[in-house]
Image: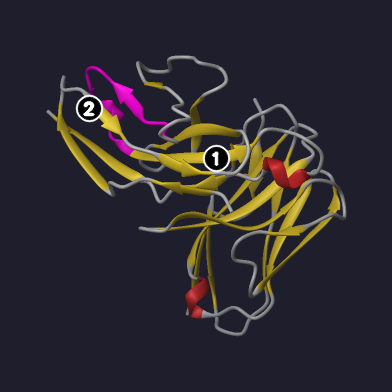
Amino acid sequence: DVKVTQSSRYLVKRTGEKVFLECVQDMDHENMFWYRQDPGLGLRLIYFSYDVKMKEKGDIPEGYSVSREKKERFSLILESASTNQTSMYLCASSGWSDGYTFGSGTRLTVV
Amino acid sequence: AQRVTQPEKLLSVFKGAPVELKCNYSYSGSPELFWYVQYSRQRLQLLLRHISRESIKGFTADLNKGETSFHLKKPFAQEEDSAMYYCALSGQGGSGGSNYKLTFGKGTLLTVNP
């Protein structure tokens, strides 16, 4: 089974901090994605990457950046955390012919 | 622009009753449609995709291109079906990674009562 591992299950950060969310997949998938999940809003795509060092903006990239230096790792960066970025963050990966596999999520609270 | 609409935020049925979760989409090309499910305290997982035409856990979904719908159905709901269900859409392959991004609906929380 494909495993997508998110480094933290819960995080609490202060407003203005720089926050790193890490995601690692172990099946050599080309595509990786970051979503945020909010009640009543579903999943919204923040950024995605279809190759090392490649990235594309999703639907809500403002306030976020990403890094993909290695194929297996895709990091989401909150440059200056704000309270409206309190959310559940989901990482996913897929191959060209596979469906998505999701990580278990990181619940981030910004205080 | 691609869009997925799930008109019901909440759906409550009794055990043994039929259930239908609605999904409508907007996409200019040939879409690939999916249903994902998230059980309480578990990660989001794929339930079914239209190209495989499988029946998973008794659920089926048919792509209706005329009505741009992909409704999820099960003839007899079980209590263990209680979960959040998301309909999702992507493009069908082609060059470039952007065809592979999934656009999700806002989800329907299904509760199956005993």
Instruction: Classify 10 Å Cα crowding around label 1: few (below 14), some (14-19), many (20 and above).
Output: many
**Is B22 left or right of B76, judged from the image as shown?**
right
Residue B59, placed above or below residue A103: above
Give the label on residue B89, or none: 1
Tell which tag, 1 or 2, sits nearer the viewer.
1
Regarding residue B43, the answer to whether it shows in the image is no
Q: Position of residue B70 (x, y in %)?
A: 42, 31
**For residue A106, which quarter of the picture?**
bottom right
Q: Amino acid at mark 2?
A: Glu
User: In this figure, which residue is indicated by the disc labeled 2?
Assistant: B79
What SS does tag 2 mark?
helix
Q: Position of residue B52 (x, y in %)?
A: 56, 17
Residue B110, placed above or below residue A80: above
> Where, quadrant-wise, is the N terminus of chain A in this rendering?
top right
Q: Residue at x 45, y 39 (%)?
A: B87
Q: Nearer the viewer, residue B76 or B64?
A: B64
The residue stretch that appears in magenta: B69-83
Q: Residue at x 56, y 49 (%)?
A: B2
Q: Position of residue B104 (x, y in %)?
A: 50, 47
Q: Are marks 1 and 2 on the same chain?
A: yes
Give the CA separation, mark 1 to mark 2: 27 Å
